[in-house]
Amino acid sequence: MRRRILALAIAGALFLVACGGSEGDGDVIEGEDVVVDMFDNRFEYTEVSIPVGGSVTWRGAGANPHNAVDADGRWSTEDVFGSLDQHEGDEAKLTFDNAGTYTFYCTYHGNAQGNGMAGTLIVGEG
């Protein structure tokens, strides 16, 4: 019985680590107009770099609803999509006209401190 409980505890811990998101993945994309898929429960890229005037298309790519929200509340996929719930195939394209570095996260699977499903958007030289 103890072995079974230990095995379940280990499996649960591994599951939480796997769903913990993108911390440490190091996935980076650069470009003028990029697409970032939102998987269960991680962003395809944890660092996105675009020039001023560039855009990011946030695309649902998993069974769970996702979104992308700026940690300081300056922008959200809800602004253009009309809902925080983006499902598989749903897209929200945001254009960024101001240089800066933004922490983004999914309100369901991350937080504004950059934990869980979160990443960094660099617009211009940051």
Image (cartoon, helix red, strand yellow):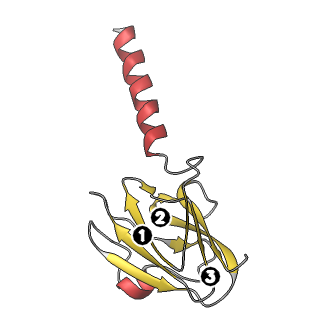
* Left or right of residue 62: residue 7: right
User: Is residue 9 visible in this depiction of the protein?
Assistant: yes
Relative to 36, say whether 82 is above or below.
below
Q: Which residue is mark 2?
A: 106
Relative to 24, say whether 126 is above or below.
below
Residue kind at label 1, given as amino acid type: Asn
Among numbered discs 3 and 1, the one appearing first in the sequence: 3
- Report crowding for label 3: few under 14, some 14 to 19, many 20 or more residues within 10 A (C-alpha): some
Q: Residue at x 59, y 79 (%)?
A: 73
Q: Nearer the viewer, mark 3 or mark 1?
A: 3
* Left or right of residue 126: residue 23: left
> How far separated are the C-alphas under marks 2 and 1?
5 Å
Residue lying furthest front: 31
Relative to 106, say whether 54 is above or below.
below
Residue 30: x %, y % from top left: 57, 69
* Left or right of residue 36: residue 103: right
Q: In front here: 21 or 28?
A: 28
Residue kind at label 2, given as amino acid type: Cys
Q: Which residue is mark 1?
A: 67
Relative to 78, say whether 43 is above or below.
above
Say which element carries label 3.
Answer: loop
Among numbered discs 3 and 2, the one appearing first in the sequence: 3
Residue 87: x %, y % from top left: 28, 68
Among numbered discs 2 and 1, the one appearing first in the sequence: 1
- Report crowding for label 1: few under 14, some 14 to 19, many 20 or more residues within 10 A (C-alpha): many
Q: Are marks 2 and 1 in contact (CB under 8 Å)?
A: yes
Q: Which residue is mark 3?
A: 51
> How far separated are the C-alphas under marks 3 and 1?
22 Å
